[in-house]
Amino acid sequence: MAQTPPDVNGLSIGILGGTGDQGKGLARRFSIAGHTVLIGGRNAERAASVAAEIGLDGSDNATVAAQADIVIVAVPWEGHKATLESLRAELAGKIVIDCVNPLGFDAKGSYALAVEEGSAAEQAAAVLPDSRVVGAFHHVSAVLLLDPAVDSVDLDVLVLGDDREATDTVQALADRIPGMRGVYGGRLRNAHQVEALTANLISINRRYKAHAGFRVTDI
Amino acid sequence: MAQTPPDVNGLSIGILGGTGDQGKGLARRFSIAGHTVLIGGRNAERAASVAAEIGLDGSDNATVAAQADIVIVAVPWEGHKATLESLRAELAGKIVIDCVNPLGFDAKGSYALAVEEGSAAEQAAAVLPDSRVVGAFHHVSAVLLLDPAVDSVDLDVLVLGDDREATDTVQALADRIPGMRGVYGGRLRNAHQVEALTANLISINRRYKAHAGFRVTDI
């Protein structure tokens, strides 16, 4: 606890699926925080076009995965496994941050999908044995991330993983965004409930007309 | 949101498994808040003895389930289903608050157990079709609840259920304990991740040497 946090200054960040709201929002905030950020997408031209909207560069997911120091996975759950399988070589040796929430939606709202590997993060770890997979940034509101009027994003980011140096690094990255705090949240095997909790946040947002997040008390 | 919360003043509260730390801690706090609280246990004499330690009355679970206006289920997960099956008649028509977390423990810490019905709360609802089952009080630290030096228990209580009047009532009950706030957390089908999140809290407590809880931001 008293250790110096890792120095993440100067690390470049690639965002797979960065054309979606969550990825684009994180890209925007990390860029404001001083990082070089690359937006990845299935289609390089579309990724470049979306990236340009927020003053960034974009390319296809494979190029971004190869170029960035740290990679955030923000692709739709439907394409999660196949996308990561196709990028195994590019992502080898890197910290890969999975923020994907496998959710279903019906007339009663959202609910957690069953995942064979336990969670999206564990699926990423299974598909990418040579990467250092961390789960984080599940609960942050894309609306707040993209809103120019919001200076501070008020929540704790639960960071899950089995590699201490990697989770410390991702906590330090979360700390770069004003209002956010990176908090160690447990091993990867306990990622499912953190991903699934996004369904509860959606219920809370609907009931209270809010963009809710979580803070951890007593730490 | 602007509605008047239900008046829970004067409601008596029975706690099944009230001889455990979690149940005993909730009993203590609700008693301080002015409620009549009954401690239930498998063994009436032991329940009465534990209850006497905090100035309360205790009896066997069936007696407590029959007498109390609202019943909190704080039994060990191992006995959860059988205990509730045996109390179906006593619990009929009542609000039943399930705070049980189905967790396993091994050398790497704690993890969520798979539950056939989805969650402890959904199991309770399946076993007690004539009761109004709500999930709540999963994350509150028994240590804090029992500590006489702690005046305020600083966390939000996520309240889950499909019966609006019942969840409103349980939110109002949570509000009775200083520091606590009852927050609607979604339908019963989204209870699993809230129960399982207790495993993450245990990891957080170990890492940060804390008694952590969660607060919901922006509401």
Image (cartoon, coloured by chain):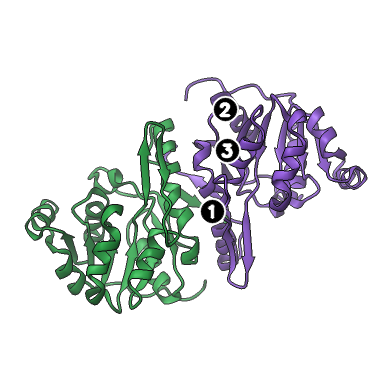
Chain colours: A green, B purple
Q: Which residue is mark 3?
A: B181
- Picture layout, residue A141 above or below residue B166: below
Same chain under badges 3 and 1? The reply is: yes
Q: Are marks 3 and 2 in contact (CB under 8 Å)?
A: no
Give left or right: position of A112 versus A47.
right
Residue at 18% across / 53% down in the picture? A19
Q: Residues within 10 Å of mark 2 (few under 14, many from 20)?
A: many
On the image, the x and y values in percent for residue A119 come to 42, 59
On the image, the x and y values in percent for residue B121 come to 60, 41
Give left or right: position of B162 versus B21.
left
Q: Which residue is mark 2?
A: B168
- Picture layout, residue A151 above or below residue B177: below
Give left or right: position of A167 versus B195.
left
Please state which amino acid type lies under the numbered disc 1: Leu
Q: Residues within 10 Å of mark 1 (few under 14, many from 20)?
A: many
- Picture layout, residue B65 above or below residue A192: above
On the image, the x and y values in percent for residue A121 come to 39, 62
Please state which amino acid type lies under the numbered disc 2: Asp
Give left or right: position of B91 versus A134.
right
Residue at 91% across / 46% down in the picture? B49
Residue at mark 3 to residue at mark 1: CA–CA distance: 18 Å
Q: Nearer the viewer, mark 3 or mark 1?
A: 1
Quadrant, the C terminus of chain A: bottom right
Q: Quadrant of residue A174?
A: bottom left
- Picture layout, residue A4 above or below residue A154: below
Label number found at residue B118: none
Label number found at residue B197: 1
Same chain under badges 2 and 1? The reply is: yes
Same chain under badges 3 and 2? The reply is: yes
